[in-house]
Amino acid sequence: MACCNLSGLYETNGGERRDNGCSVGELRPSVVSVGGELGCYGGGVLRGAATPRIDKLATEGLLLHNFNVESDCVPTRSALMTGRHPIRTGCRQSVPAGFPQGLTQWEKTLAECLKDKNYATAHHGKWHLGDIPGRYPSDRGFDEWLGIPRTTDETQFTSSFGYTPEVADLPYIMKGKSGEQSENVAVYDLEKRRLIDEMLIDQSKDWLSRQVNEENAFFLYHPLVHLHFPTLPHQSFAGSTAQGDFADSMAEMDYRVGQLIDHIDNLGIRDNTSLIFASDNGPEFRPPYRGTAGPWSGTYHTAMEGSLWVPFIIRWPGQVPEASTSNDIVHVTDIFSTIASMTGSPVPSDRPIDGIDQTEFFKDPNAIKSSRTGFLFYIKEELRAIKWKDWKLHYVWEPKVNQSSERLESPYLFNTVRDPKEESDILAFNTWVVQPMMKLKS
């Protein structure tokens, strides 16, 4: 998988009021993003590196087998931050530096919703939702941020033949605080690519310690850079697996997640913290950093199951049962609505919110079904597919990125449980399925 999210909720004991306006008994979320192919999902050792820390996390809560995202980084991140499909927000694709991109100012982010409940907020990692003043994390509800405003392939700029800063701006690691102008920290080159995740973890550990010491309600969004290409490990992990840079980076990713989990536990808030691990998109398609979608077909930038389906784990001691699994459908927009519900944070009422609150389902997945039966899947402005229960209807057939695609005269229908690779069109035998799918469009 390309990149994953680890989200969390934190609450302290008691119920007295604090000066920050929050009850100590209120939920205090910390959200962290990392990435990788996990042993608990058939990755790990099979891809060259064990992921013991994240695998252990999967045994401590709920593991979903049908968590779905958008086609690539920007659409998924916007869906997480707004609870709205990218076709509504305009964040439909990743674009190069220097072009208009990111969330418009009239979209309200999850961080802004939580600020309405007096939460301290921070973003440490890969933002990719705006790279100009007014669209940095510190302009979108986060008190402070450290990371990269766009993506990580830009680290190759300074090592590319013919590149000069006069023809294309240098990429930077940046930082900022709410109410202040964001500033450059260091040129983001291939050397910093290997070091950035260590830097981000150190920053988040320090920030978490400060919030716990100050008894602040907090929300931490930490999208690690791994495993976005170029997938280059920290020097201390280089060669550690003897399986190349990708596997070494997986090993480092797992270690970084473990560092964060250990820090949360050492702060004494394990029993009051909910952690969610979920990817932002399917595997990379470019060699030598190409990933795998396991039993599914496709990579990100397609409408195949390998693009939509990504890992999801939630640990919430005393709330979510340990060692539980589910194949019910959940969508990335649901995380917005679920965290807002868990924290009692208000969401906008003046626009459609596509996310569905899954709190009760997460708490009792053995007895309660997901509140979602399906969703529409767009790539840019085009409706490519509809997913409903065990069924998937394709309007456009593009199983590989940049493969010539045309709208199908007769859509393809697959049962994704019986045919996970989407190889046998069975619409002619199951035309009834189209009716409930059309209701999702209305």
Image (tube, rainbow, N blue to C red):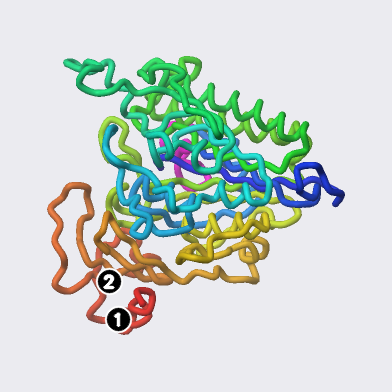
Question: Foreground residue, 430 or 272?
Answer: 272
Q: Residue at x 43, y 71 (%)?
A: 389
Amino acid type at image mark 1: Asn
**How far across and how far down the image is residue 371, in percent?**
54, 70
Q: Which labelled disc corresponds to residue 316? A: none
* Residue 88 placement, left or right of 95: right
**How far across and how far down the image is residue 236, in percent?**
50, 16
Judging by the rendered image, the residue that carries numbered circle 2 is 413
Q: Where's the C terminus, which quadrant? A: bottom left
Judging by the rendered image, the residue that carries numbered circle 1 is 430
Amino acid type at image mark 2: Leu
Work out whether residue 60 can be spotted.
no
Closer to the chain start, of discs 1 and 2, is 2
**How far across and how far down the image is residue 71, in percent?**
33, 51
Pointers 1 and 2 in contact (C-beta within 8 Å): yes
The span picked out in magenta is 35-49
Question: Is residue 38 covered in magenta?
Answer: yes
Q: Residue at x 57, y 71 (%)?
A: 369
